[in-house]
Image (tube, rainbow, N blue to C red):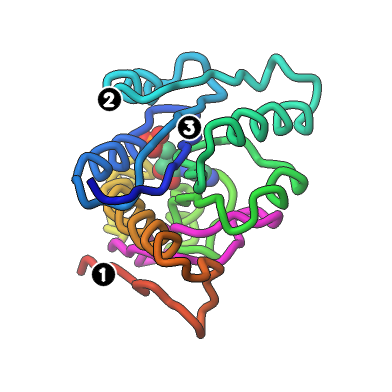
């Protein structure tokens, strides 16, 4: 079996992106393996997906902590113990403190359901439809202290249809998120295995600019 980068995945909900990563990791030559799945929500469906795949899970319920910093400190300790080299946020709906993010430079990947820098934050599909955009999509990026603004690893685009609702657009984007995340994690993990710099810059290393679907 080839050498693999240890990955921890952080979730809050359904975990379909987690499932896409679990499925990708099954492939013997895929350069990453999920060693731990953490949820801040005790009932997240993603936790059962992880258990079914035989992956170690932890619930770190943020409501049990007095502050964001306390929660993040606990998270950091668990992640250090897992020996993970990459942290994948997959529908993890907590903002991580600056301190946490700086402890893990060039390590945290996030999937966001818009073509950043458009529509950072929440309610992305509602806002995209309100703005009347004709193209939407998703972005895989490294996490920095500024929300949804770290270096972009890759993007995938989908058309916005005239009769779209936030739900139908979200579903179309989600299909692309799954492909993009699996591809992007493969790329970053391969870079680490080859001891290459994973600090992506636009000029230096644009990965796959866009997976156009129309
Ligand atoms: C995904 O659409 C993901 O991009 C989004 O939450 C959904 C989680 O779905 N994440 C964010 O909005 C983060 N800001 P999943 O639990 O089925 O992977």
**Which residue corresponds to the image point at 38% horizontal and 54% vertical from the top-left?**
185
The answer to whether the residue bearing label 3 lies less than 8 angstroms from the nearest atom of ligand 1 is yes
Q: 131 or 22, which lies in front?
A: 22
Where disc 1 sits, the SS reads: loop
Q: 185 or 123, which lies in front?
A: 185
Give the left or right position of residue 150, taking residue 43 as reference: right
Residue 203's spot in the image, x, y percent?
Answer: 51, 85
Where disc 3 sits, the SS reads: strand
- Segment colored magenta: 133-159
The residue most toward the bottom is 203
Q: 121 or 168, which lies in front?
A: 121
Q: Residue 212's mark?
A: 1
**Which residue corresponds to the image point at 64% horizontal and 56% vertical from the top-left?**
105
Residue with the mark numbered 3:
11
Q: Residue 62's mark?
A: none
Q: Residue 53's mark?
A: 2
Location of residue 202 with respect to 30 vertically, above or below: below
Residue count near mark 1 (Cα–Cα under 10 Å), binned few <14, some 14–19, many ≥20: few
- Mark 2 or 3 closer to N-term? 3
């Amino acid at each position: 079996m080839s050498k693999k980068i240890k990955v921890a995945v952080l979730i809050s909900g359904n975990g379909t992106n987690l499932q896409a990563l679990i499925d990708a990791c099954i492939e013997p030559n895929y350069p990453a393996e999920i060693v731990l799945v953490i949820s801040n929500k005790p009932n997240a469906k993603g936790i059962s997906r992880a258990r079914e795949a035989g992956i170690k899970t932890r619930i770190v319920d943020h409501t049990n902590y007095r502050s964001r910093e306390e929660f993040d400190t606990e998270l950091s300790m668990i992640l250090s113990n897992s020996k993970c080299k990459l942290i994948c946020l997959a529908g993890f709906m907590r903002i991580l403190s600056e301190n946490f993010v700086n402890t893990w430079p060039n390590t945290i990947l996030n999937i966001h359901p818009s073509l950043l820098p458009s529509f950072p934050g929440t309610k992305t599909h509602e806002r995209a439809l309100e703005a009347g955009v004709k193209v939407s999509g998703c972005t895989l990026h490294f996490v920095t202290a500024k929300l949804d603004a770290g270096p972009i690893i890759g993007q995938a685009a989908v058309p916005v249809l005239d009769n779209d609702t936030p739900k139908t657009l979200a579903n179309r984007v989600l299909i692309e998120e799954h492909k993009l995340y699996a591809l992007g994690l493969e790329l970053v993990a391969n870079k680490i295995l080859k001891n290459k710099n994973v600090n992506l810059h636009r000029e230096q290393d644009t990965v796959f600019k866009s997976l156009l679907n129309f």
